[in-house]
Image (spheres, grey):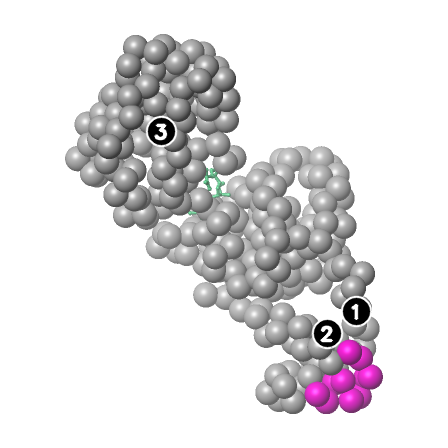
Amino acid sequence: MLEKNALYVVATPIGNLSDISLRALDILAKVDVVAAEHTQNSGYLLAAHAIRTKLISLHQHNEMAVAGKILALLASGKSVALVTDAGTPGISDPGAILVKHIRAHGYPVIPIPGANAAVCALSVAGIVNPHFLFYGFLPTKSGLRKRALSALKSHPYTLVFYEAPHRIVASVADMIDIFGSQREITVARELTKLFETIHTGTLEATLVWVQADADQQKGEFVLLVSGAETADKPEISDQARHTLQCLLAELPLKQAVKLTAEITHENKNALYQLALQLKTTHTR
Ligand code: SAM
């Protein structure tokens, strides 16, 4: 059922056109107006689902002005949906200014949940740490980017970034500069699309992998970087790490861990966790 005088914030696909909910399609077909970041892009989506609702443009440069117009539409009894080019509005996308304005005037703002690139990447990364910090886009200039990364350096949660294809190499290189080479990164590229790739490895190994293949520098990216080691996590010496790596290449995981613990006298649980990390350095 459609509420009158309401703004619906509607998530749309991040690549695969089928990733849209039945409720989203129903709302987009029934509202009076759809406000879209790019009316042409959203026009294709609506047309693919035989929806002919009127589109108006709302983007980061006109958001406040259009918010006034949408408020007037709601005041006159109309209902409006907000969509962006991809994913959930307001997440590294326009929407927050409009939503704030409409809520401040007491009209209902109703979420229609769906795709989001960050959550999509997290869902397939197999990261055991339950906590993450969504950062979105880092600054585009290296100096500012390094400053932003320095501020995140001691953060213990998985760090979630969006990145553009032409900055992927420079950003991972800056991460190595600031975080060191051994943190784990998952690169989630072109999610839900033809060339979907999910690669996990150390920052160092991943930089080499991305640099070696120009195709891995194309498309859209989510980067998930492991957080800082916390004090209660025992550190593992370089020598123990090396021993474990060598044994893992030859033996089953459990045996490699057991032998490394015997040889190096390091904590067996910590070695087991490291072995799991080392084993998950892979690509799909
Ligand atoms: N609102 C969107 C969401 O909910 O995820 C994000 C919009 S933001 C302008 C676009 C960025 O999201 C891209 O540059 C990329 O970093 C990430 N992204 C969007 N679609 C993606 C996909 N299919 N695969 C990987 N990353 C994606």
Residue 262 counted in the magenta span? yes
**Residue lying farthest left?**
50
Q: In this view, does 107 lie to the left or right of 279?
A: left
Quadrant where the N terminus is found in the figure: top left
Residue 60: within the magenta?
A: no
**Residue at the spot x=70%, y=88% of the render?**
258
The residue lying toward the viewer, choosing from 213 and 277, is: 277
SS category of the residue bearing label 3: strand
Q: Nearer the viewer, residue 145 or 101?
A: 101
Comes first in the chain, label 3 or label 1: 3
Q: Where is residue 70 in the image (x, y as percent from the top left)?
A: 37, 15
Residue tagged 1: 234
Dot placed on the residue nearer the N-terminal end, 3 or 2: 3
Which residue: 59% across, 48% down? 160
| Residue 177 position within the rendered picture, expressed as x and y whole percent measured from the top left | 75, 51
Distance, label 3 to label 2, CA atoms, is 48 Å
Comparing 240 with 69, the one in front is: 69
- Residue 46 visible (yes or no): no
Residue assigned mark 2: 270
Q: Do the residues labelled 2 and 1 touch (CB within 8 Å)?
A: yes
Residue type beneath disc 3? Tyr
Q: Is residue 194 visible?
A: yes
User: Could you say which is closer to the camera, residue 188 or residue 273?
Assistant: 273
- Disc 2 crowd rating (10 Å Cα; few below 14, some 14-19, many 20+) is some
Q: Determine which of the numbered discs, if any, sits on residue 8 in the image.
A: 3
Badge 1 crowding class, 10 Å Cα cut-off, few under 14, some 14 to 19, many 20 or more, is: few
- What is the magenta range? 258-267
